[in-house]
């Protein structure tokens, strides 16, 4: 996207916001720090523009491991079916590459006439909005930094924290190969605005529970090596989660893919977690997205993401999901 395109779309979004009164924001299913951070940043900007704003948790429970973030209490523990979508003028869908990443419970377009603005950083975005601002960047919070700067909005201390957390998490602590020079420059500006952003990241990294360690042990115990030793796939069953009494809170702060990717020989990692019986969350990571583009794997299963980090959902048995993912990895890599 050219600078001119960015500026034009950015101004179009601002005009739609100015014409709207009640605006809806959401977290995507299984929300991560970029999803939460982006929602809180946009909510603060919109409130500053005099708009009525509602943020809902959406399909998943509130991610309480991120409850330390400033203004987290703005997020309502409500799903899509708890709302009357006719109460809103506008939905701003952020960090969601498709309608399914807005909600897997309902089809927003079929259930409302809401105008939709999409702000995202995934190259695989399906451009489902009435206005789509999709920039291939490491995090949606990076796109928002540029967008609200275009609007002339000042970065507050709370915005700085929520942006920094999103940037830090989606770049794996600024170590993923799609981290840009601009990302580090923005991070520096955010820290200069509020040095507490660094403390917040440390807090984020210390949210494990004792059961989180059981979750990691299950992942390590159920590893399947494939693609000539270049890839590893870990599969955790719903039954094992139940047996160990591991709940969503225990898994929120754990990045299994990053842990497994620390093994020198493994270039590609897939983690399959059966959060519900017959519903498999697939997370894919690559050491080098140019050599091993895991978004290609995710797209086979209707998902998407980045070359080095992608995901999908499968509604099959864990055994079938494991077989399908291993076959896809071996066919492509």
Image (cartoon, rainbow, N blue to C red):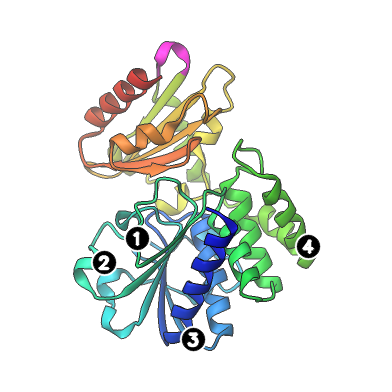
Q: Residues within 10 Å of mark 3 (few under 14, many from 20)?
A: some
According to the picture, the residue beneath numbered tag 1 turns out to be 102
Q: Secondary structure at mark 1?
A: helix
Q: Is residue 84 visible?
A: no
Disc 3 secondary structure class = loop
Mark 2 and mark 3 in contact? Answer it, CB < 8 Å: no
Residue 309 vertical position relative to residue 206 in the rendered view, above or below: above
Q: Nearer the viewer, mark 2 or mark 4?
A: 2
Q: Residue at x 51, y 62 (%)?
A: 36
Please give the residue where the numbered disc 3 appears in the rendered image.
Answer: 51
- Residue at horizontal 25%, vertical 71%? 81
Residue, disc 2: 108
> Which image quadrant is residue 222 in?
top left
Q: Residue 207 placed where, x, y %? A: 58, 52
Q: Pointer 4: what residue?
A: 195
Mark 1 Cα-neighbour bin, 10 Å: few <14, some 14–19, many ≥20: many
Q: Residue at x 65, y 69 (%)?
A: 149
| Dots 1, 2 in contact, CB < 8 A | yes
Q: CA distance from mark 2 to mark 3?
A: 22 Å
């Amino acid at each position: 996207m050219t600078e001119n395109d960015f500026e034009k779309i950015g101004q179009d979004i601002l005009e739609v916001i100015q014409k709207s009164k009640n605006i809806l924001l959401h977290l995507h299913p299984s929300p991560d720090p970029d999803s939460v951070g982006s929602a809180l940043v946009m909510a603060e900007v919109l409130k500053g523009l005099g708009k009525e704003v509602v943020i809902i948790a959406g399909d998943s429970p509130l991610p309480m491991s991120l409850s330390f973030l400033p203004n987290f209490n703005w997020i309502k523990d409500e799903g899509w079916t708890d709302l009357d979508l006719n109460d809103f003028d506008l939905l701003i869908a952020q960090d969601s590459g498709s309608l399914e990443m807005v909600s897997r419970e309902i089809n927003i377009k079929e259930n409302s006439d809401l105008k939709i603005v999409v702000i995202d950083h995934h190259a695989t975005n399906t451009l489902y909005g009435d206005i789509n601002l999709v920039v291939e960047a490491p995090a949606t919070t990076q796109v928002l930094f540029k967008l609200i700067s275009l609007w002339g909005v000042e970065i507050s201390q709370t915005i700085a924290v929520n942006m920094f957390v999103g940037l830090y998490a989606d770049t794996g602590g600024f170590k993923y190969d799609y981290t840009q020079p601009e990302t580090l420059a923005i991070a520096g500006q955010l820290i200069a605005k509020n040095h507490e952003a660094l403390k917040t990241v440390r807090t984020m990294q210390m949210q494990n529970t004792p059961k989180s360690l059981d979750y990691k042990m299950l992942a390590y115990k159920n590893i399947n090596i494939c693609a000539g030793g270049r890839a590893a796939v870990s599969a955790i069953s719903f039954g094992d989660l139940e047996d160990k009494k591991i709940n969503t809170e225990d898994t929120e702060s754990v990045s299994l893919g990053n842990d497994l990717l620390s093994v020198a020989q493994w270039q590609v990692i897939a983690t399959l977690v059966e959060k519900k019986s017959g519903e498999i969350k697939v997370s894919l990571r690559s050491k080098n997205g140019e050599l091993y583009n895991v978004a290609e794997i995710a797209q086979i299963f209707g998902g998407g993401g980045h070359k080095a980090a992608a995901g999908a959902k499968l509604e099959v048995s864990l055994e079938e999901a494991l077989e399908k993912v291993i076959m896809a990895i071996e066919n492509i890599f």
